[in-house]
């Protein structure tokens, strides 16, 4: 990934928290990424149709991977590399376990021969040497020379020919070197290595800890890379996407269709007004606002079917947008449940303190995992309705009021169960109000921090709605910053086709 992360020499004197550590000698400092990226401004350039070769397609795929990774590092403060083993009961996990056991059994057998056979062990030492060297900066000459000298495979092979290899001494040197280079979190692993007596098991565990150290190294690099990316992400993403577009001219096809659909939605909503105006030319397009069209497109993402491909310019945020959509669906159900309960039971519970929050707290756990295919919403709603009836009756009983009779309970449970039905009036109403709130949020200037007024019926989920809304607005505003020039070019062609072709294609509008 062509990114730059200038690190000061001061960091060389301290161990690296949550990552690999360095000794007080600057030779143990970590190697940063080198930069080959440019901060030049980028705007969408028009490219004539051309045949795309396989190599160009693969290059575009690599660019997209880099773009997605850079975006994730910058916007997700919790992004890190985690060590994961294959499940032992899986086929791949079983094959891996068998092959590893066969390798280490073979090594143990060779070392137990008389005289010992060291060829496999020498190859392991060569691999360990390369891993240790990878943790060093180019300027770490002293320890680099020492590692190369001690783990000189040619020398070890000569010693093996005379049965003079001090394999335990080599392993101890490796462990001590790892102790100088590892993160504090690995200190206990190093102690356990020192306590391991069997040489084969020791080598096996050395590779395990080295894998953890490589993961730590990657996470430390990510941690230091994040501030740079956050400062330069707009230019970086725009430049990277321009490279993808030049290599794959069709890289905006889905985005263009997404904007076309938004235009069609807006034309449909204004068609009645246009045709009813005296003297209106039915063949002319209404003057649609590009901002309105684009915002309408962003709203569609909250109801997007994520089984189909998302527009190319939104791939980097696909997971976040899908999570927001699922969260909004969950909040919609809760708002529906509370509204139905209030309308069914009536004034007896309208002013009961904390009852709405209690109903919400009851519903949330039962709606966890709504996005999973195995989730049964009807069953969840049935469980929620049973809990709601119980809580309402308890509240009424505590205040000396008559509890719900069987007919009222059945009515309440039936209405809650009907939320899943298509065109359910309560569900449709709450959905429209959620969409209205999100639309109002997008209409606010990006620098404005206040929230729009919460529509009626959503007060019970106001805190959650404002949190989701702020996340959504942040994604949308950043996406506009990065891809605004590309959207403007598409919108000019679709909305203002009467403009001169050259001008529409070559001018790069401001964000």
Image (cartoon, grey):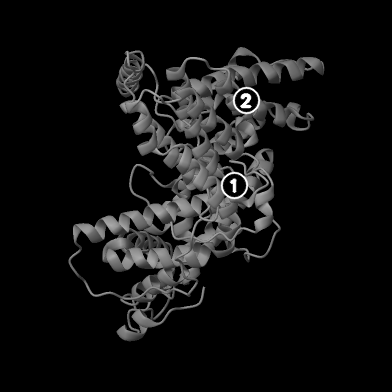
Marks 2 and 1, the one that precedes in the sequence: 1
> Which quadrant is home to the N terminus?
bottom left
Mark nearest the camera among 2 and 1 is 1
Numbered circle sitting on residue 188 = 2
- Disc 2 from disc 1: Cα separation: 20 Å
Please report contact status of discs 2 and 1: CB closer than 8 Å, yes or no: no
Which residue is found at the position 37% from the left and 78% from the top? 496
- Can residue 308 be seen in the rendering of this structure? yes
**Can residue 457 be seen at all in this image of the molecule?**
no
Residue at figure coordinates x 34%, y 24% from the top left: 118
- Mark 1: few, some, or many residues within 10 Å (few <14, many ≥20)? many
Pick the front one: 123 or 93: 123
Q: Is residue 193 left or right of residue 347?
A: left
The residue pinned by badge 1 equals 28
| Residue furthest right in the image | 399
- Number of other residues with Cα within 10 Å of mark 2, as a class: few under 14, some 14 to 19, many 20 or more: few
- Seen at 32% across and 13% down, the residue is 114
- Image position, residue 119 (x, y; %): 31, 27
- Residue 339 position within the rendered picture, expressed as x and y whole percent measured from the top left: 62, 35
Q: Which is more toward the observer, 29 or 297? A: 29
Locate residue 234 relative to residue 88 in the image: left or right: right
Seen from this angle, which residue lies furthest front?
Answer: 162
Q: In the figure, 318 relative to 370: above or below?
A: below
Q: Position of residue 129 (x, y in %)?
A: 44, 39
| Residue at image point 71% right, 58% down | 450
Q: Secondary structure at mark 2?
A: helix
* Residue 333 drawn at (x, y percent): 55, 34
Residue 449's place in the image compared with 385, above or below, is below
Can you tell which mark lies on residue 402? none
Near-viewer residue (457 or 489): 489
The residue lying toward the viewer, choosing from 372 and 244, is: 244
Q: Is residue 165 left or right of residue 417?
A: left
């Amino acid at each position: 990934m062509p990114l730059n992360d200038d690190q000061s020499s001061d960091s060389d004197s301290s161990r690296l928290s949550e990552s690999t550590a360095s000794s007080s000698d600057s030779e143990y400092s970590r190697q940063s990424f080198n930069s080959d990226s440019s901060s030049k401004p980028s705007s969408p350039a028009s490219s004539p149709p051309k045949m795309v070769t396989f190599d160009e397609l693969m290059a575009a795929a690599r660019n997209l991977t880099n773009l997605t990774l850079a975006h994730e590092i910058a916007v997700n403060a919790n992004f890190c590399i985690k060590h994961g083993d294959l499940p032992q009961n899986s086929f791949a996990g079983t094959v891996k376990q068998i092959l590893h056991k066969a390798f280490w059994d073979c090594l143990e057998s060779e070392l137990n021969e008389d005289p010992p056979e060291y060829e496999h062990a020498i190859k392991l030492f060569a691999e360990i040497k390369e891993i240790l060297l990878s943790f060093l900066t180019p300027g770490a000459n002293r320890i680099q020379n020492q590692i190369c000298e001690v783990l000189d495979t040619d020398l070890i092979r000569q010693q093996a020919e005379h049965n003079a290899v001090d394999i335990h001494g080599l392993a101890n040197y490796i462990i001590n070197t790892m102790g100088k280079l590892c993160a504090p979190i690995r200190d206990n692993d190093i102690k356990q290595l020192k306590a391991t007596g069997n040489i084969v098991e020791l080598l096996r565990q050395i590779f395990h800890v080295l894998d953890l150290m490589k993961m730590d190294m990657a996470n430390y690099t990510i941690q230091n890379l994040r501030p740079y990316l956050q400062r330069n992400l707009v230019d970086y993403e725009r430049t990277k996407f321009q490279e993808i577009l030049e290599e794959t001219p069709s890289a905006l096809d889905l985005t263009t269709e997404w904007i076309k659909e938004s235009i069609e939605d807006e034309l449909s909503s204004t068609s009645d007004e246009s045709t009813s105006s005296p003297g209106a030319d039915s063949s002319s397009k209404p003057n649609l606002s590009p901002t309105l069209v684009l915002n309408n497109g962003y709203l569609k993402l909250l109801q997007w079917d994520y089984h189909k491909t998302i527009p190319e310019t939104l791939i980097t945020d696909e997971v976040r947008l899908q999570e927001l959509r699922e969260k909004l669906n969950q909040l919609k159900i809760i708002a529906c449940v509370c509204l139905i309960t209030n309308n069914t039971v009536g004034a007896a519970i309208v002013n009961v303190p904390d009852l709405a929050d209690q109903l919400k707290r009851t519903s949330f756990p039962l709606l966890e995992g709504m996005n999973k295919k195995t989730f049964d919403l009807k069953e969840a709603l049935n469980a929620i309705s049973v809990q709601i009836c119980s809580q309402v009756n308890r509240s009424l009983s505590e205040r000396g009021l008559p509890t719900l009779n069987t007919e009222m309970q059945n009515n309440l449970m039936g209405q809650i169960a009907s939320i899943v039905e298509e065109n359910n009036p309560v569900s449709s109403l709450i959905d429209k109000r959620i969409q209205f709130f999100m639309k109002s949020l997008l209409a606010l200037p990006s620098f404005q921090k206040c929230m729009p007024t919460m529509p009626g019926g959503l007060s019970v989920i106001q805190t959650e709605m404002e949190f989701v809304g702020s996340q959504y607005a942040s994604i949308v505003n950043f996406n506009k910053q990065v891809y605004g020039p590309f959207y403007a070019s598409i919108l000019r062609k679709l909305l203002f086709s009467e403009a001169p072709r050259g001008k529409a294609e070559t001018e790069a509008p401001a964000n």
